[in-house]
Image (cartoon, rainbow, N blue to C red):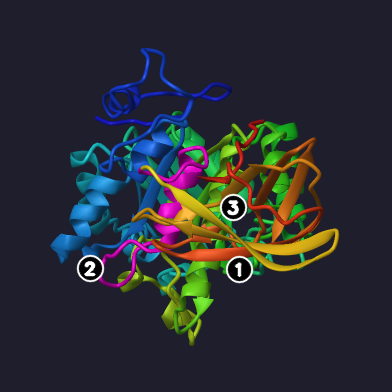
Amino acid sequence: MFRHRPIRGRRTTGLLATALVTLSVGLTAVAPAHPAYADTATLGELAGAEGRYFGSATDNPELSDTQYTQILGSEFSQITVGNTMKWQYTEPSQGRFDYTAAEEIVDLAESNGQSVRGHTLVWHNQLPSWVNDVPAGQLLGVMRNHVTHEVDHFKGRLIHWDVVNEAFEEDGSRRQSVFQQKIGDSYIAEAFKAARAADPDAELYYNDYNIEGIGPKSDAVYEMVKSFKAQGIPIDGVGMQAHLIAGQVPASLQQNIRRFADLGVDVALTELDIRMTLPRTAAKDAQQATDYGTVVEACLAVSRCVGITLWDYTDKYSWVPSVFPGQGAALPWDENFAKKPAYHAIAAALNGGSPAPGGSCTAVHRVTSRWQGGFTAEITVRNNHTAPIAGWTVTWTLPSGQSISHVWNGNLTVDGRGVTVRNASYNGTLSSNGSTTFGLQGGGTADTPADLTCTPGRPSRTSA
């Protein structure tokens, strides 16, 4: 039976053999930190080389789509059961448990060697109506019984459980669910205790949306987790759902992941999608790709961020259009299972900033105006690879007597005669054969540099 549990405090390399066989022939015996993967490298393999998982949620109706299941079974190292572990499916009437639908997905994941997250035991939505009718004095026992029965049923087969889901409002107050109203604040801790007793090995998570950045809601969750750790309440992780909007990734995402990790819990991005206002355009795709890369890099920068799960992987089965009218195209595969720029940005981020596979770009210099003692020029950066690139760097050496005073649409560094210009935040992702232009103003003679070089990929990240 496949069990993937990232080892805290060190990088696991369970896919090292895969990485080694895909290294190019000319490399020495010592593998680089971020090997060059072949075209067949999957997101699951790339994440595995970083000691993380990369997964997708799924739901039972989709499993009849053979093209869908082929990608689901081959691209990802982890699966989340999107709906059929929820209370309305698993205990539709009191004391009558049914795991048939959930078992179908767990069995599929196990047959593919994929780990499974359990989602979710206690939530105010998708409850059978009978739960709301349970008298206040009996609901705690009913909740404990439900948690115990379901966790025990899947004991030894799941790596994580989302024990309690979405228990806070945006202002940080407790959501007035039936559990909050009839049991009180203690219901969350009691659910975690019951889950730990039923399966001591599964890692137990609190899961919520809009807690990716630092704010009142995430602060409230932070204080709860801090209190649980101080009291010895069994909690192992926090799930940040990460239902995001293109161009609006929280600037404090990485800082927020780190502050939870500093409490001694793991963090997982559990339901990632990044929606846009329809229709799709190349510019919107580029922004979305940049955002996906940013999210992946934020996770990789914190060692206790153990994995990322897409909330399904294809726009064909996305929940977004039905909930947010006029929005969609939120996932890395489109509705026809074609990989979007977001896919390649994720792969590049997992591969240390290098496009996967390969990647190349060119830079072409053109003088646009000149005067005595000065000039302006533009440099066009073009992606020559079939996959998009996520970031670029252009370098050259200044001719004798020349200087650069400033650059627009790029970030300038000058070291002696050496010039480096890196992409701005908005123009780093280039689609196949895509291009962008940055400009500069210089002093001296407007000579064209002879050693102009373009390198794809973001600068190397740091890890903490």
The kind of secondary structure element at disc 1 is loop
Q: Amino acid at mark 2?
A: Pro
Tell me the residue at 56%/65% (across/down). Answer: 436
Residue type pointed to by label 1: Ser
Q: Are marks 2 and 1 in contact (CB under 8 Å)?
A: no
Q: Which residue is mark 3?
A: 294
Q: Quadrant of residue 90?
A: bottom left
Q: Secondary structure at mark 3?
A: helix
- Neighbor class of circle 3 (other Cα within 10 Å; few <14, some 14-19, many 20+) is many
Q: Nearer the viewer, residue 135 or 448?
A: 448
Dividing the picture into quadrants, the one containing residue 36 is: top left
Residue segment shown in magenta: 332-357
**Left or right relative to 464: residue 75:** left
Q: Which residue is found at the position 62% from the left and 52% from the top?
A: 187
The correct choice, above or below, for 133 with respect to 203 in the image is below
Report which residue position mark 1 lands on. 177
Residue holding disc 2: 61
Q: Position of residue 81 (x, y in %)?
A: 34, 55
- Is 57 in the magenta? no
Towards the viewer: 220 or 446 = 446
Farthest-out residue, front: 372
